[in-house]
Image (tube, rainbow, N blue to C red):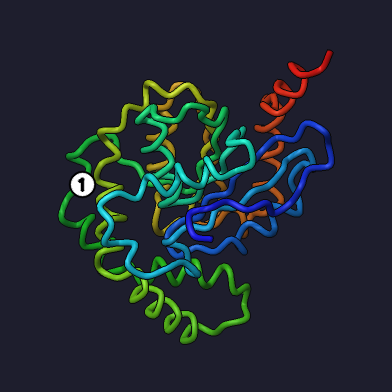
């Protein structure tokens, strides 16, 4: 169901680390498959069904607020407790926006942001930036299709699919994406208490490594990893390295369900 989270992989421990996966614009939950197979079995994996996914629904771009979709997904996880969120691209930015609002009664303890978009000041946006993201939007979508197809589609097929996906997103969807990007300089990042890991790609044509580094510099507790030769989908292109980073990062997180279970024990 759109807006809900569903259990993708149970953990093999009594006190799992509840982990929610959040897609980017035009993404699919299939992109997480390589990671899911490689991450620590103590991670209980949930995936969010969101309207801007490739299998989502039309018309979402006409909504004035998209952040509530992230909140609904978090709250729909069993018990409403999520320890770790792994969010990609556009989804990562909407998650950041939600966290900065401070409205969640039980926010996640830790967050992995994959290829987020960020500019530290409004003057870092100019007309050239708008032109790049507008006129090359289908090429950015095509990059994701190329990676996910793993050589099964030729360049012409990739382009055709990218153009169809661009039509599904539509002008309103593009405006929502770019508006979210434009608002990143105003996020109250200094108030966030979560631990963050940012994973970016050195060859990312959409979210530049500079975006990841600038964001990491402004988060109180954050480490950044820029993967050489990697584009916008690190969880696919560098699955083993990405899973390793998530595993190491997650070792410092105490599952909230363990605290609850412990409190109930005599």
Q: Is residue 1 above or below residue 196?
A: below
Percent x, y of residue 218: 38, 27
Give the residue at x 54% y 35%: 111
Q: Nearer the viewer, residue 264 or 54?
A: 264
Residue on which the image places disc 1: 125
Q: Going by the picture, which residue comes out furthest to the top?
A: 266
Instruction: Classify residue 125 as left or right of residue 205.
Output: left
Which structural element holds mark 1?
loop
Of residues 184 and 218, which is closer to you in this image?
Answer: 184
The 10 Å Cα crowd at callout 1, few under 14, some 14 to 19, many 20 or more, is few
Percent coordinates x, y for residue 225 in the rendering:
55, 39
For the residue pair 204 and 153, the one nearer the viewer reads as 153
Residue at 40% x, 49% y: name it: 208
In the figure, residue 34 lies in which quadrant? bottom right
Residue 237 seen from this side: no
Image quadrant where residue 153 sits: bottom right
Q: Quadrant of the C terminus?
A: top right
């Amino acid at each position: 169901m759109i807006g809900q989270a569903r259990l993708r992989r149970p953990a093999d421990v009594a006190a799992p680390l509840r982990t929610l996966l959040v897609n980017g614009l035009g993404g699919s939950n299939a992109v997480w498959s390589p990671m899911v197979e490689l991450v620590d079995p103590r991670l209980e994996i949930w995936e969010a069904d969101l309207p801007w996914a490739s299998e989502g629904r039309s018309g979402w771009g006409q909504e004035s607020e998209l952040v509530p979709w992230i909140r609904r997904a978090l709250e729909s996880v069993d018990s409403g407790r999520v320890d770790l969120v792994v969010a990609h691209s556009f989804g990562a930015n909407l998650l950041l926006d939600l966290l900065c609002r401070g409205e969640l009664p039980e926010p996640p303890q830790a967050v992995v942001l994959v290829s987020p978009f960020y500019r530290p000041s409004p003057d870092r946006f100019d007309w050239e930036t708008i032109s790049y993201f507008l006129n090359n939007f289908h090429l950015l979508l095509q990059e994701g299709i190329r990676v996910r197809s793993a050589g099964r589609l030729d360049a012409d097929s990739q382009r055709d699919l990218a153009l169809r996906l661009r039509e599904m997103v539509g002008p309103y969807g593009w405006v929502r994406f770019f508006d979210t990007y434009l608002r990143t300089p105003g996020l109250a990042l200094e108030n966030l208490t979560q631990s963050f890991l940012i994973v970016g790609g050195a060859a990312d044509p959409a979210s530049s490594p500079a975006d990841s580094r600038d964001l990491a510099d402004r988060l109180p507790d954050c480490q950044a990893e820029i993967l050489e030769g990697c584009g916008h989908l690190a969880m696919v292109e560098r699955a083993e390295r990405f899973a390793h980073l998530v595993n190491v990062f997650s070792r410092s997180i105490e599952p909230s369900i363990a605290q609850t279970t412990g409190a109930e024990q005599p």
